[in-house]
Image (cartoon, helix red, strand yellow):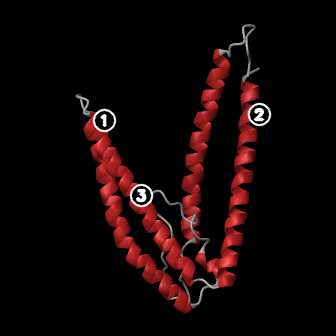
Amino acid sequence: MRIDWQGRRTKAAIRGAAVMYAVLALVGAYQTVTYDAHAAEGQRWGGPGRGGPGVGIGRGRGGRPGALLPPLRQLDLSDEQLDQVREAVGESREAGRETARAMRAARRALGEATAAEELDEDRIRTLAAELGRLEGDAAVGRARLYAAVWQMLTPDQQARAAEIRSERQERREERRGRLRERLEERLQDLGR
């Protein structure tokens, strides 16, 4: 970053930082989308010998696939466990859909309230609080599903799941570090 003789940052350096943050935001969004697509595929179980197409775990707004549990097929679940997991997912799915509908409606209402010609702070705060409550409900629903599925796993499967989660976290951190290095290099190149 260039600093002039008075110690102020130059406009080019500020623009470079803005570009860096914009790129980070775009890359983060892209990684989330591609991660969601790949993880969603990995979250499916079923197929030959398992009774057809499967169901994903941990998907939905605010919960990235695989964030709760690794792809269950990596844990070699028994047929009985698969049936139990499918049942737990099915039970949580409708509640999740209802919460998602209510969240969309709350976001829409909050957006309309914030864009209204007349400011109504009380209404905005009420709508924001309702949206926060719904986000909390969604998080609790995901946590309940996670806990239910976790209890269905054997101790060996739980250990393997924790190991896979740790490996994924390490890979994510490595990717983020490489991305930061590349962005810093580009910003240095732009600052010349």
- Does residue 20 sit above or below 69 in this rendering? above
Question: Mark 2 to mark 3: distance in Å?
Answer: 40 Å
Question: Mark 2 to mark 1: distance in Å?
Answer: 40 Å
Q: How crowded is mark 2: few (under 14 residues within 10 Å), some or many (20 or more)?
A: few
Residue that carries the numbered disc 1 in the rendered image: 114
Residue nearest the viewer, comparing 34 with 17 = 17
Disc 1 residue type? Thr
In the rendered image, the residue lying farthest to the left is 118
Q: Which comes sooner in the sequence, label 2 or label 1?
A: 1
Give the quarter of the image for residue 38: bottom right
Q: Residues within 10 Å of mark 1 (few under 14, many from 20)?
A: some
Front position among marks 1 and 3: 3
Secondary element type, mark 1: helix
Disc 2 residue type? Glu
Whether tag 2 and tag 3 are in contact, CB under 8 A, the answer is no
The location of residue 97, given as percent across then percent down, is 35, 66
Residue nearest the viewer, comparing 52 with 167 = 167
Secondary element type, mark 3: helix
Q: Which comes sooner in the sequence, label 1 or label 3?
A: 1
131 relative position to 83: left or right: left
Residue in the picture at 68% in, 71% down: 162
Question: Mark 1 to mark 3: distance in Å?
Answer: 22 Å
Whether tag 1 and tag 3 are in contact, CB under 8 A, the answer is no
- Residue 185 is labelled as 2
The location of residue 85, given as percent across then percent down, is 49, 82
